[in-house]
């Protein structure tokens, strides 16, 4: 076939192909990571990439008691909070990733600059909020010497936790054992365990989220109390959602349905009155399913938003789309 | 080269080289065009059906985002593409027939297009669904004047005069004066200026956040005011409609609340907030059966659980105690 043929007869085909390509790449629908909600609209692309793919290294006492695991899970879950915070997927870790500080955190009417927040604002609190925006720099929780309450094992600090959860973030009263665990976790956070006060970063990784998920589900057998169980199940489901959203750009039906199935299995666990033995069986079956799922997730990880390169491309694509929309 | 190989190999007895080349060229073109068209249709529309066994009716319903369509209408209005603006706003009204702002801007799109006859109905609906839209009254008066309906025009003028009389230095005075000017210009056959004051999305967002704060402070009247402002930017947004329902419910306006929830769910039947608050509405009126249905609905929608389902569960549990 001659070049003249391609020139004259394929113009239409190329035009149609261009239309197709321009419609397929809707990056604005693909960057569905919850953390985006609390980033400034004016954030630079490089800072955005950092905020979405990196987190601070945690400064946890290596000799901390076992219950810090639950404390950390609660700290990282929107299920601990209530009201507007829970609805948008906010957790304590949103402002304090790895119990440090988030320099990119920004919410309209709550922040006056990235890295600031006003927890007394009536946006989050239906009982104790005020009108005045008094945003302060989000403190690094590992810098204990800079905190007002330095003794995190004290009743003062415990009361502060209750106030934060129930008054400032409209949460329900968490079971005492969970508050114990949360208090224990925060009491064992200190820059001295990091050997440096500087906040160093590490990648947000599927393996970490998966490890937390397993810790969460395993805790169900260690805490048979119904109220704690219900909270742990809600927390585990939220963790699954976090992972689901990181894979949402791939739009893979198999991955989506496997994560939803794991969540629904946990839901059944929460609704059914089962004996301890039956619960153990259900959890065992859940782990079997989860192990198979993890293999698949790991295979697809390079295409997911756990991969900084992918997030970077999507950010660029979104910027290009926004420019096109603004020129229309 | 390929053509020559094929001809030499198998088809020499059946085709000439020229005929084969023509066949390949045409087939390539048809396949490419068909494939491209199929992909475009798949990307641009959710409609799959058509009676040829392609899909079931529920999959064939064309879905679109009315909030995006509303924004599209506003963009066309600002660019003076009135026909396109009319089309966009009419589309919004197919899912949100009681949205006052959409009716208002549709009216303006017709009016600016020198079609007072078609502008009349949208302005009538705008004033019906939002009695505080003073400019809509002014436009309606101008439309009646242009249509030669003196009595109806006078009625609008009198409404405005009465409002002015009871408004010494109120916030609406500016709008009242502009509206009277609209009618006067129409009476004098002068060009009626278009008063398009479209609030930006940022203003809409800010108003929405203020509304949420007001709701948390239990100042529901203030919340409704902010929500109205937000709706001006966004049109029939389910978040706004849901909170309009919530605020009205808290003020005891149950029928109005129910109406807003239904509007929100018409735009997005999976909206978590609307489903939750509708459930709470049912708890408040003592219909626990319907409340539990709403809870089941939320559990179905929320694949990973959600605060909305938990909150409704607590409401139902409290009612059962």
Image (cartoon, rainbow, N blue to C red):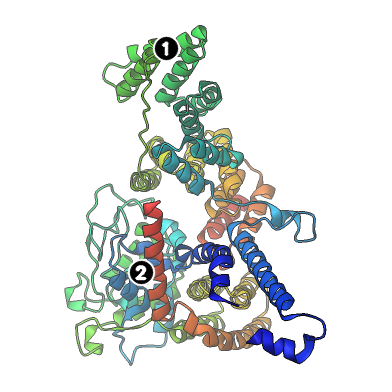
Left or right of residue B79: residue A137: left
Asked whether residue B283 is in view, the answer is no
Q: Are marks 2 and 1 on the same chain?
A: no
Q: Position of residue B193 (x, y in %)?
A: 36, 24
In which quarter of the view is residue B76 placed?
A: top left
Q: Quadrant of residue B264?
A: top right
The structure residue drawn at horizontal position 40% and vertical position 44%, both measured from the top left corner, is: B215
Q: Which residue is mark 1?
A: B157
Q: Chain of mark 2?
A: A
Residue A221 appears in the rendering: yes
In the rendered view, tell whether residue B10 sits above or below residue A251.
below
Residue at the disc numbered 2: A94
Q: State which chain disc 1 sits on.
A: B
Q: Residue at x 46, y 33 (%)?
A: B105
| Of residues B227 and A180, the one drawn nearer to the viewer in this rendering | B227
Closest to the observer: A7 or A153? A7
Badge 2 marks a residue whose secondary structure is helix
Picture coordinates of residue B139, whole percent (x, y):
44, 21
Measured along the vertical axis of the image, is residue A307 above or below residue A111?
below
Residue A146 drawn above or below residue A171: below
């Amino acid at each position: 076939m001659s070049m003249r043929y391609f020139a004259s007869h394929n113009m239409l085909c190329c035009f149609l192909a261009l239309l197709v390509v321009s419609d397929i790449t809707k990056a604005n629908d693909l960057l569905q990571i919850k953390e985006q909600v609390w980033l400034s609209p004016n954030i630079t692309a490089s800072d955005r990439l950092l905020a979405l793919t990196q987190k601070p290294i945690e400064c946890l006492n290596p000799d901390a008691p076992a219950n810090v695991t639950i404390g950390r899970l609660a700290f990282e879950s929107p299920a601990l909070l209530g009201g507007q915070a829970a609805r948008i997927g906010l957790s304590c870790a949103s402002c304090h990733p790895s119990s440090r500080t988030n320099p990119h955190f920004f919410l309209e009417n709550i922040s006056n600059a990235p890295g600031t927040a006003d927890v007394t604002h009536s946006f989050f609190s239906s009982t104790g909020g005020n009108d005045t925006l008094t945003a302060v720099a989000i403190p690094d929780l590992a810098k204990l010497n800079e905190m007002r309450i330095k003794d995190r094992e004290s009743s003062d600090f415990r009361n502060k936790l209750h106030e934060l959860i129930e008054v400032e973030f409209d949460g329900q009263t968490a079971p005492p054992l969970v508050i114990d665990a949360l208090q224990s976790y925060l009491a064992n956070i200190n820059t001295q365990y990091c050997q440096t006060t500087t906040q160093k970063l590490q990648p947000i990784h599927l393996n970490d989220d998966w490890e937390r998920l397993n810790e969460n589900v395993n805790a169900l057998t260690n805490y048979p109390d119904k109220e704690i169980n219900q909270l742990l199940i809600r927390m585990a489901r939220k963790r699954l959602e976090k992972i689901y959203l990181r894979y949402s750009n791939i739009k893979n039906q198999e991955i989506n349905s496997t994560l939803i199935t794991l969540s629904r299995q946990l839901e059944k666990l929460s609704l059914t009155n089962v004996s301890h033995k039956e619960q153990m069986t259900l959890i065992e079956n859940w782990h079997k399913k989860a192990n198979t799922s993890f293999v698949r997730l790991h295979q697809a990880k390079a295409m997911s938003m756990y991969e900084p390169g992918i997030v970077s491309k999507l950010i660029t694509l979104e910027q290009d789309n926004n420019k096109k929309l603004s020129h229309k | 080269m390929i053509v020559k190989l094929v001809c030499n190999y198998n088809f020499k007895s059946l085709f000439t080289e020229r005929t084969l080349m023509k066949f390949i060229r045409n087939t390539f073109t048809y396949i490419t065009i068909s494939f491209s068209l199929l992909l475009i249709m798949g990307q641009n529309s959710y409609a799959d059906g058509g009676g040829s066994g392609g899909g079931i009716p529920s999959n064939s319903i064309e879905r679109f985002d009315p909030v995006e369509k509303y924004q599209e209408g506003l963009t066309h209005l600002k660019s003076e593409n009135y026909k396109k603006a009319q089309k966009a706003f009419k589309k919004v009204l197919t899912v949100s027939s009681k949205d006052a702002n959409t009716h208002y801007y549709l009216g303006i799109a017709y009016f600016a297009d020198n079609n007072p006859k078609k502008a009349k109905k949208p302005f009538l609906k705008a004033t019906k669904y939002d009695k505080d839209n003073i400019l809509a009254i002014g436009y309606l008066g101008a439309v009646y004047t242009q249509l030669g309906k003196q009595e109806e025009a006078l009625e609008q003028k009198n409404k405005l005069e009465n409002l002015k009389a009871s408004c010494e230095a109120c916030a609406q005075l500016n709008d009242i004066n502009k509206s009277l000017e609209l009618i006067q210009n129409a009476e004098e056959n002068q060009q009626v200026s278009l008063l398009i004051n479209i609030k930006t999305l940022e203003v809409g967002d800010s108003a929405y956040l203020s509304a949420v704060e007001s709701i948390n402070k239990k100042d529901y009247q203030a919340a409704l005011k902010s929500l109205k402002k937000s709706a001006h930017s966004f049109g029939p947004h389910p978040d706004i409609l849901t909170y309009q329902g919530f605020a009205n419910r808290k003020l005891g306006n149950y029928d109005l609340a129910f109406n807003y929830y239904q509007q929100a769910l018409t735009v997005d039947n999976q909206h978590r907030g609307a489903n939750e608050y509708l459930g709470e509405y049912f708890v408040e009126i003592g219909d626990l059966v319907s409340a539990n249905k709403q809870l089941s609905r939320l559990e179905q929608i929320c694949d990973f659980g959600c605060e909305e389902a938990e909150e409704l569960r607590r409401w139902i549990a409290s009612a059962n105690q």
